[in-house]
Image: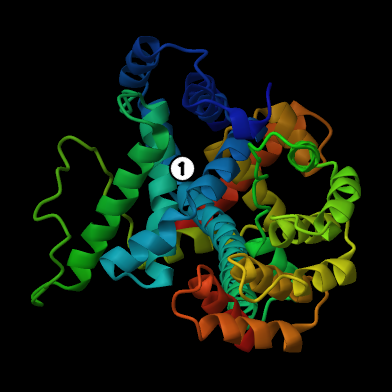
């Protein structure tokens, strides 16, 4: 595999689908590659740095979802597509913040074409705080195992290696127990 | 009977693509426990996703801080370069202004204004004319030593009609051989009534400039400036302007 800096959009999307370490590498690369949009869009839309950080993170996750679920047709460059997601999500939040307030920002679009660009509604900060707190309560190793399995898509052998377990069977058992712990907390 | 662990393994196999969507849907519809487990699984993933978002947010924050530092460095570097460019421009401007205002050296002025006159031929068919013509040929060929050898005795001959012109060419040849003092003295011998007196004055001024004797050169140049009809009047003014800066 060539250096990640030289990966094409297709190779990055393939890495998302493959999951595991290669997905993490691709995500890290995109974050570093697109981070310069953050201050620009924040300035343009009037979001605070904290708000822009949330929206940017959400946009990265949306990009991964949409490219792996084939919603992304490849008609534009991945960077352009990401910028659109990030920008529209920012505008969404800006409008939400300024509901019933008079807005003189002429450059903001009148309406967001959400039909042509499927964007999942951003989770509110409150939701996120509540949900990820459950994972914080099941211990660091369990949290990492569940993240590796449920979000990053590592296979059981890789999870075992990363968590210092003996093999995939032990990793499966551990994951099962971790899930049970989590479910007890949620109930 | 399938256990909860079996259901989870089956769901994992579906997620990894081992089981087709059709098979999975059929199985789920016929197995209520599996369906319930799948619904729980979806909820689990939501929680995990929110934790993943937290993890990603930290990565984004780190990247943002790195980007800000990099941007600050680039900004600083740009500023330094801009300031350096302004300084370089100012230094160049100051250098130019100083050079413009600085009086030029005598030898520079000599080099800027000295033009060696062409040789002058004689058409009379006599011995003197032959020597004169030969001297002029040598002068044209820039053999100034030979020119002096031929002209020096000739100009001393009684009744030689071109003595003043001859002395001028001897002086010019000496000047070209860098015998400046001799050239100066030679130009001095030219009769004030002669039509070559203006040349003599001009070249005397130039020789003095070449010798960096600015004070004496100035005196002659002022004399030229005082003669509105002098053929080097304008050039003399120009040189004086440069000297007086």
Q: Residue at x 62, y 35 (%)?
A: A5
The residue to which callout 1 is attached is: B45
Please determine whether, in this image, residue A125 is positioned above or below residue B211. Answer: above
Name the foreground residue: B29 vs A157.
A157
Q: Residue at x 74, y 59 (%)?
A: B163
Q: Residue at x 45, y 59 (%)?
A: A131
Q: Residue B208, how many percent across, how many down?
A: 77, 76
Please determine whether, in this image, residue A32 is positioned above or below residue A70. Answer: below
The image quarter in which residue A22 lies? top right
What colour scheme does the image use?
A: rainbow
Name the foreground residue: B121 vs B237.
B121
User: SS for tag 1?
Assistant: helix
Specify the subunit that label 1 lies on.
B
Q: Local crowd at mark 1 within 10 Å, few (<14), some, or many (≥20)?
A: some
Q: Residue B54, how many percent across, how many down?
A: 52, 58
Q: Residue B106, how many percent across, how many down?
A: 74, 75
Decide if residue B96 is on the left or right side of residue B29.
Answer: right
Name the foreground residue: B174 vs A135.
B174
Q: Residue at x 58, y 32 (%)?
A: A153
Q: Residue B128, how many percent across, how many down?
A: 78, 43
Decide if residue A77 is on the left or right side of residue B218.
Answer: left
Can residue A116 be seen here? Answer: yes
Name the foreground residue: A93 vs B88.
B88
**Could you tell me which quadrant the C terminus of chain B lies in?**
bottom right
Q: How many marks?
A: 1
The image quarter in which residue B108 lies? bottom right
């Amino acid at each position: 595999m060539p250096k990640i800096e030289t990966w094409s959009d297709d190779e990055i999307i393939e890495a998302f689908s493959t999951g595991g370490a290669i997905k993490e590498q691709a995500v890290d690369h995109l974050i570093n590659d697109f981070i310069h949009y953050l201050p620009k869009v924040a300035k343009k839309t009037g979001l605070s740095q904290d708000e822009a950080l949330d929206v940017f993170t959400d946009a990265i996750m949306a990009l991964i979802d949409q490219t792996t679920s084939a919603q992304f047709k490849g008609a534009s460059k991945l960077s352009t597509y990401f910028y659109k997601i990030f920008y529209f999500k920012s505008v969404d939040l800006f409008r939400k913040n300024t509901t019933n307030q008079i807005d003189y920002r002429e450059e903001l679009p009148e309406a967001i074409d959400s039909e042509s660009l499927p964007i999942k509604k951003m989770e509110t900060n409150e939701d996120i705080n509540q949900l990820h707190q459950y994972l914080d309560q099941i211990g660091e190793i369990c949290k990492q195992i569940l993240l590796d399995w449920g979000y990053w898509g590592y296979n059981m052998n890789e999870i075992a290696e990363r968590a210092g377990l003996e093999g995939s069977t032990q990793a499966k058992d551990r994951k099962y127990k971790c899930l049970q712990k989590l479910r007890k907390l949620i109930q | 009977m399938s256990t909860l662990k079996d259901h989870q393994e089956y769901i994992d196999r579906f997620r990894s693509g081992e089981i087709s969507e059709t098979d999975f849907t059929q199985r789920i519809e016929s197995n209520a426990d599996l369906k319930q487990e799948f619904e729980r699984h979806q909820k689990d993933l939501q929680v995990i996703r929110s934790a993943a978002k937290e993890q990603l947010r930290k990565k984004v924050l780190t990247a943002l801080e790195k980007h800000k530092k990099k941007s600050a460095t680039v900004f600083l570097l740009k500023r330094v370069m801009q300031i350096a460019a302004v300084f370089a421009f100012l230094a160049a401007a100051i250098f130019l202004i100083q050079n413009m205002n600085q009086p030029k050296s005598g030898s520079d002025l000599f080099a800027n204004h000295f033009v060696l006159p062409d040789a002058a031929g004689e058409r009379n068919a006599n011995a003197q004319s032959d020597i004169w013509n030969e001297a002029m040929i040598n002068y044209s060929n820039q053999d100034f030593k030979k020119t002096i050898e031929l002209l020096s005795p000739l100009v001393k001959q009684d009744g030689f009609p071109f003595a003043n012109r001859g002395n001028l060419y001897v002086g010019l040849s000496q000047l070209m051989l860098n015998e400046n003092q001799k050239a100066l003295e030679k130009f001095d011998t030219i009769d004030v009534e002669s039509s070559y007196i203006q040349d003599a004055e001009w070249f005397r001024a130039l020789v003095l400039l070449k010798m960096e004797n600015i004070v004496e050169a100035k005196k002659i140049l002022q004399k030229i400036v005082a003669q509105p009809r002098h053929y080097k009047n304008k050039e003399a003014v120009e040189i004086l302007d440069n000297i007086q800066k």
